[in-house]
Image (cartoon, rainbow, N blue to C red):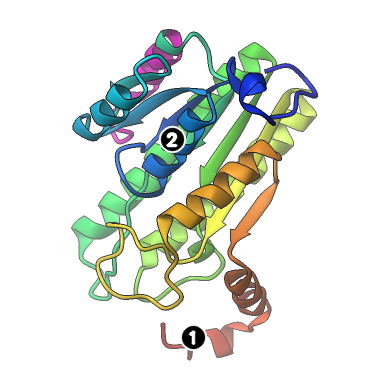
Amino acid sequence: MSKGIKYTGMEENMDKKIIVMGASSGIGREVARLFLQRGFFVGLAARRSEPLKKLKKAFPDQAEILQIDVTREDAPALLRELIRQLGGMDVYFHAAGVGDHNETLMPDIEMKTVDTNAVGFTRMVGEAYRYFAEKGEGHVACITSIAGTKGLGPAPSYSATKAFQNVYLQALEQEAHTRHLAIRFTDIRPGFVDTPLLSKPYPMLMKPERVAKAIVRAILHRRHVLVIDWRWRILTALWQRMPRFLWRRIKI
């Protein structure tokens, strides 16, 4: 990725390479599809490989696929392999994640969430950062969530790991600046999206197609932090200003 390049127009995008971690379903799959349509070369990675093969079939000359489970210790090495297959990486987009209601604090749900959203996130984003540090430039974009704004009682580990992701990206950005590395970061915080991740109805649900378009625009314009959409921007601003004694009385 050349310094100062603008991501506008199909011809300018033909030599751009993005890896989408979590491209098998939901927002990740839709974002991958949109970048492929724009002419990007896209590395598709996920725990399940069958959905990736369908995208590869639709864009055989632009897509490379590799099965990667972010909870496994070999995942960073596999990311490097996918980078090699793709011929490089200009943007790393992390969409892999899990989450569920867990009012009864079932241990398996809590630990699976931490393993994927905290440990797996650190494993993969850290490896992408190291690659870009070696290269001298790059762009890390991640789906975090508005759930990281405050602790959500029905989903303790989910909201906690999303807050972790926000802070981790902030820390990497500071470190990159200190080291004079041209690595950009985009922290994407959607509200509730109608994907298989949600096991019960939520208010103000958004369609993944709409959210994916906003994400692509954010990456192309190198946005720093993006809360999707305007309703959630207003709501999270109110959440941030709410004192603890009042927040604990809110029913979500």
Residue drawn at x 23%, y 58% is 109
State whether residue 110 is above or below residue 57.
below
Give residue 47's position: percent from left, percent from top: 25, 34
Is residue 202 shown left or right of residue 146? left
Residue drawn at x 45%, y 65% is 206
- Range of magenta residues: 69-84
Residue 206 circle label: none
- Which residue has dot 1 on it? 248
Choose the circle earlier in sequence order: 1 or 2.
2
Q: Is residue 96 visible?
A: yes
Q: Is residue 67 visible?
A: no
Residue type indicated by callout 2: Ala
Residue drawn at x 43%, y 66% is 192
> Of residues 10 and 82, which is closer to you in this image?
10
State whether residue 242 is above or below residue 164.
below
Q: Nearer the viewer, mark 1 or mark 2?
A: 2
Secondary structure of the residue carrying tag 1 is loop
State whether residue 126 is above or below residue 107.
above
> Of residues 247 and 66, which is closer to you in this image?
66
Give residue 35's position: percent from left, percent from top: 50, 33
Neighbourhood count class around disc 1 (C-alpha, 10 Å): few under 14, some 14–19, many 20 upward: few
Placement of the N terminus among the 4 image quadrants: top right
- Which residue has dot 2 on it? 32
Secondary structure of the residue carrying tag 2 is helix
Magenta: main secondary structure equals helix
State whether residue 238 is above or below residue 249.
above
Give residue 225's position: percent from left, percent from top: 67, 51
